[in-house]
Image: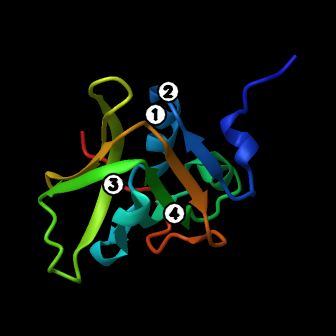
Amino acid sequence: MTEDARFEDGGERPLNLGALDVDDLGVLSALVQDAVLPVTEIRWQKGVRRLGLLINRVRWEDVEIAKRFDRPVERVQSVLVVDNVLSVSSQGVDRADKDLILQVLAVSWEPGDDAEGFVVLTLAGDGALRAKVEALEVGLRDVTRPYAAPSGTLPDHED
């Protein structure tokens, strides 16, 4: 018998996850919620049909443990990769402003014809990145050791 992985199974290990369907993408979206990145850390590699973002994400899989042991919330640098990209568009993202910091609110799927569709990264401040893809394939991989979040606390969500 096999068991689904539990959120806490991530523990102290770096994440390396993929999403090939909407349910998987929902998990990745939860893990990258409140991630921040400089606009300069977005790359579209047209020749290999890949959109990559180097993000600083909250380690949501570790938050309960941090609370239990009264230690700061951690972040980790991760690469968020969208494959099979046919085109990329954006709204509210000034690529010329090299000091611009973006915050990811969610990653979602808008289906199109057959397997085609759009992977949408909703950003704070009414911004968005929209990648038209041939098929849904998104990856998330931690690439650094965790570090204490500069604020030491969770992001503040106003209702």
The quadrant in which residue 71 appears is bottom right
Q: Position of residue 30 (x, y in %)?
A: 46, 41
* Amino acid at the residue labelled 3: Val
Crowding near the residue tagged with mark 4, few <14, some 14–19, many ≥20 C-alpha atoms within 10 Å: many
Q: Is residue 130 above or below residue 74?
A: above
Residue ID for mark 1 = 26
- Front: mark 4 or 1: 4
Q: Position of residue 103 (x, y in %)?
A: 31, 60
Q: Give the answer, above or below, for where 2 lies relative to 40.
A: above
Of the image marks 4 and 1, the number of the one nearer the N terminus = 1
Amino acid type, mark 2: Asp
Residue at the extreme right:
1
Check the image and name the residue furthest to the top: 1
Residue drawn where x is 58% and y is 65% of the image: 72
- Hey, which residue is sitting farthest bottom in the picture? 98
Is residue 103 visible in the rendered image? The answer is yes
- Labels 3 and 4 touching (C-beta < 8 A): no
Mark 1 touches mark 2? (CB < 8 Å): yes
Q: Which residue is mark 4?
A: 79
Disc 3 target residue: 104
> Nearer the viewer's eye, disc 3 or disc 4?
4
Contact between labelled residues 2 and 4, with CB atoms less than 8 Å apart: no
SS type, badge 4: strand
Pointer 4 or 2: first along the chain: 2
Query: Residue drawn at (66%, 72%), measured in percent from left and top?
Result: 145
Q: Which residue is mark 2?
A: 23
Q: CA distance from mark 4 to mark 1?
A: 17 Å
Depth order, front residue of 88/102: 88
Residue 148: image quadrant is bottom right
Three-letter amino acid code of the residue under disc 1: Gly
| Dot 1 or dot 3, earlier in sequence | 1
Label 3: element kind: strand
